[in-house]
Image (spheres, grey):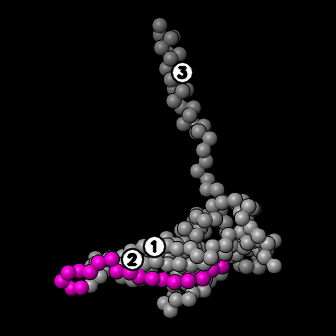
Amino acid sequence: MVANRKWSSVCLAVVLIVPCVTGCGYSTARPFPTDIQTMHVEILQSREFRRELEFRLTESIVKRIEMDTPYRIAPRASADAVLTGEILSVRNQTFGDEFNTDRPREIGSTVAVRFRVQDLRSGTVLIDRPRFVYQTSYIPPVGETFATGMVRALDGMAEQIVESMESDWSTQGQPVD
């Protein structure tokens, strides 16, 4: 009887421990293509007459690539791929006014960009997004400003741009002449 209990305890331990150690076959690695090792991010252009948005978005994209991807940032001459882009527009819309002051209660911001990732070795365009939109909002009565809203919008945009790199690029690309 005692040997039977020991055997039961050992079996139970194995049943509980083995799945924890071996896992279910899922990986926590993100599905970035592995044929690219280094990437260069050019400073984005801007059609907006707002200072430094293109620099802030470029910086956010570089930080996201460094944090979230297996790629290293490199000079253009030694990079496998290059990301280029342009801020197309930044629009604000008021969602409601304060009754007493007639000041905006909440403001929504929409940022639209165009970007492209190109393999510098073959000339193939890996990703081409002619219009990529991100929306956020900020609340002036609690002290948030346009700058606060733009930081949130540009960081969110950078995150989505880097997330769009999580795919099989080999099926998307077209050589550029």
The disc, 3 or 2, on the residue closer to the chain's N-terminal end is: 3
- Residue 116 image point, x, y percent: 66, 75
Asked if residue 13 is positioned above or below residue 5 in the image, the reply reads below
Residue at the left extreme?
100
Which is nearer the N-term, disc 1 or disc 3? 3
Residue ID at (58%, 39%): 23
The answer for how far apart the CA atoms under marks 1 and 3 are is 54 Å
Which residue position holds label 2? Answer: 108
Callout 3: helix, strand or loop? helix
Q: Residues within 10 Å of mark 1 (few under 14, many from 20)?
A: some
Mark yes or no: residue 108 visible: yes
Q: Secondary structure at mark 2?
A: strand
Q: Main secondary structure of the magenta part?
A: strand
The amino acid on which the numbered mark 1 sits, given as a three-letter code, is: Gln
- Give the magenta part as a residue range: 83-102
How many numbered marks appear?
3
Q: Is residue 143 visible?
A: no
Q: Is residue 23 above or below residue 9?
A: below
Residue drawn at (61%, 53%) of the image: 29
The image quarter in which residue 41 lies: bottom right
Residue 25: x and y in percent read 62, 41
- Residue for badge 1: 135
Name the quarter where the C terminus is drawn: bottom right
**Label 2–label 1 contact, CB within 8 A:** yes
Residue beneath disc 3: 11
84 magenta-colored: yes
Amino acid residing under circle 3: Cys
The percent position of residue 85, horizontal first and vertical second, equals: 63, 80
